[in-house]
Image (cartoon, grey):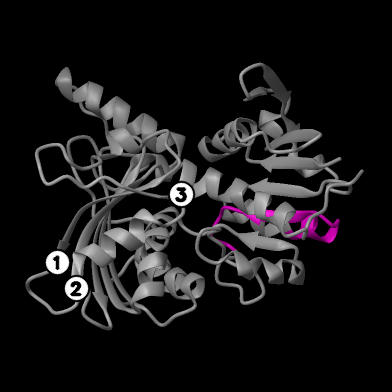
Amino acid sequence: MLKIAVVGATGNVGREMLETLAEREFPASEVVALASRGSAGKEVSYGNHKRLKVQALDDYDFTGTHIALFSPGSAVSKVHAPRAAAAGCMVIDNTSYFRMDANVPLVVPEVNPEALADAHKKNIIANPNCSTIQMVVALKPLHDMNPIKRVVVSTYQSVSGAGKDAMDELYDQTKALYTNDHKEPKTFTKRIAFNLIPHIDVFMDDGSTKEEWKMVEETKKIMGADIKVSATCVRVPVFVSHSESVNIEFTKPITLEEIYEALEEAEGVIVSDQRENGGYITPAEATGEDAVFISRIRLDASAPNCVNMWIVSDNLRKGAALNAVQIAEKLLEQQIVKLAA
């Protein structure tokens, strides 16, 4: 018997978590959908034929719940994740609140599943930032082959990373422009339709944004290595799936053949790289897929031991829901959480 809860079940990621659990036939005997008091009583889908009635998170007793997947926002996780953990529930939190806590493992199952050995320190496991996840899945097999010294990444992040209101804003602004209407930005700082915004999360003292800082620090924690990362994070008018242009500097010389071989054997990666028109993956093809797709692999002629590549992944799936479910699967596989008879 295994009871699992999804917190934030009415949001984009929460719904994707429920769908992913059902798709992968996660061995739960009971699944509970939790959200704010205002959402209590609503119904959400679990698989093709089942509906779950949402319960209020504030009133829920986590005693007897084995695993909880959290995606309600940092302020809510700050309060309720420790409450769930104290009741003996293993929390997998998708928010940023616990990621840099030294006693909370930050896990991407294809990269550092061994970090789950520390899960019982707080009964909380952190899901990394979506843009970090897809990048480290690509970096891991390369770093194992030839240690990486430095990464320069520019992201092209879809609006779904900012939630349902952001997706609605892109839709409404796009439609309005075709009718010569004007919709003031509310979720974003500037118009997102037919535009790019080089600003995700709050600004920091050094001029970088919090999203860029996350990519720098989370990469080091996940990879367990002092890899230098320079990031520029940009919001683009795409509904789902993040893209990244990545330049990687290795310690030693490297060949394209070695790159292809390492990536093609890597878990969770699909290389789709034909040097012809359309021989690459875009966000449209990645949406709804589980893999991290890699295209446009080429040596950087401007610097030694450097390679450029294009990385695309569905930020709601591998960047959030799927990664959390894979962590839950690893908890069972490593018998950190055990199925009761």
Provide the residue designation for mark 3: 319
Upstream in the sequence, badge 3 or badge 2? Answer: 2
Amino acid carrying label 2: it is: Cys
Amino acid carrying label 1: it is: Leu
Q: Is residue 92 magenta?
A: yes
Q: Residue at x 63, y 24 (%)?
A: 47
Q: Is residue 253 left or right of residue 264?
A: left
Q: Is residue 253 left or right of residue 87?
A: left
Looking at the picture, how far across and down is residue 334, in whole percent?
72, 60
Tags 1 and 2 touching, CB below 8 Å: yes
Provide the residue designation for mark 1: 299
Q: In the picture, residue 78 is in which quadrant?
A: bottom right
Q: Magenta stretch?
A: 82-97
Q: From mark 3 to mark 2, how far is it between C-alphas?
A: 26 Å
Q: Secondary structure at mark 2?
A: strand
Q: In the picture, residue 327 is in which quadrant?
A: bottom right
Tags 3 and 2 touching, CB below 8 Å: no
Looking at the picture, how far across and down is residue 81, in whole percent?
71, 56
Q: Is residue 202 above or below residue 169?
A: below
**Few, some or many C-alpha atoms within 10 Å of disc 1 (few <14, some 14-19, many ≥20)?**
some
Q: Nearer the viewer, mark 3 or mark 2?
A: 2
Q: Residue at x 30, y 25 (%)?
A: 172
Looking at the picture, how far across and down is residue 292, in whole percent?
38, 49
In the picture, which quadrant includes the N terminus?
A: top right
